[in-house]
Image: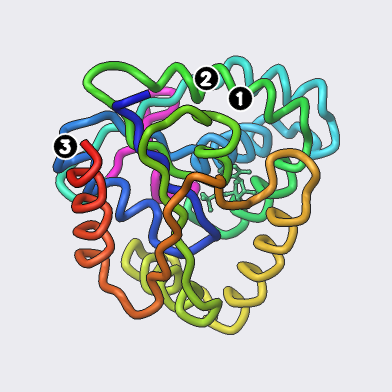
Amino acid sequence: MENIITIDGPSGVGKGTVSLKIAEYLRWHILDSGALYRVLALVAKRNQVDMDDEIKLIELATKLDIQFIPLVNKLQIIYAGQDIAVEIRDETYGKMASKIAVKPEIRKALLARQRAFYTSPGLVADGRDMGTIVFPKAKYKFFLIASCEERALRRYKQLINIGIYVKLSELAVEIASRDQRDSTRTTAPLIAASDALTIDTTKLSIEEVVERILKNISKRA
Ligand code: C5P
């Protein structure tokens, strides 16, 4: 698949921001797959569906109708006619999403929805299993990493920026436990695809990461 870029990696590494910039630059579509899991958690909460009620969660997952609309350095996430991008960024939904995401049947229910985002002229997809499971045939695969401290700080700044106030120390603990759960689950764990290029972004700015990715793509195009 010539026109898919997958960007995977742990929480707070900057995948979302990098993906948005690349998608805007190339004028390609964008899939923030983590948002699907977060929205599912939000919808479950709104409908008072228990996190262990797999049947109901699968039903909600198959009906999930989400649109991603880039808007100058911002990604609007539209669900039921509303932009819920800020609401789902709360770590409550991150944690719920990660708990939902361990269930293979729910992942299966979301697979077709994720693949449907692939339309012309191309797609930038970010998440945990974009390069391994959802788009294994993507031509361009990247896996971003950064130290735990740096990732907690990045997520902290991102949340403060959108008006969500959290304690850095608590956020660091939550992110570490989410990463642990995401990396050790049996279905689609957080892991670099064997043909992905891993980039340690700890000491890089967003612009530097974007530049590296675009350079790598143009070298291989
Ligand atoms: O990327 P984000 O922090 O929004 O993802 C929230 C959670 O959704 C992750 O911690 C992970 O458990 C789950 N997820 C996943 N597979 C993806 C994207 C996200 O399991 N492709």
Furthest toward the front, the residue is 220
Asked if residue 99 lies left or right of residue 8, the reply is: right
Amino acid tagged 2:
Arg
| Residue contact at pointers 3 and 2, CB within 8 angstroms | no
Image quadrant for the C terminus? top left
| Residue contact at pointers 1 and 2, CB within 8 angstroms | yes
- Viewer-nearest residue: 210 or 55: 210
Q: Which mark is residue 26?
A: 3
Check if residue 94 falls in the magenta segment: no
Q: Which mark is residue 49?
A: none
Circle 1 residue: 110
Circle 2 residue: 113
Whichever of callouts 1 and 3 sits on the residue coming sooner in the sequence is: 3
Name the front one of labels 1 and 3: 3
| Ligand 1 lies under 8 Å from the Cβ of mark 1 | no
Image: magenta residue range:
75-88
Looking at the image, which residue is at 32% across and 47% down?
19
Distance in Å between CA atoms under marks 1 and 3: 26 Å
Check if residue 81 falls in the magenta segment: yes
Whichever of callouts 3 and 2 sits on the residue coming sooner in the sequence is: 3
Tell me where residue 134 sits by quadrant: top right
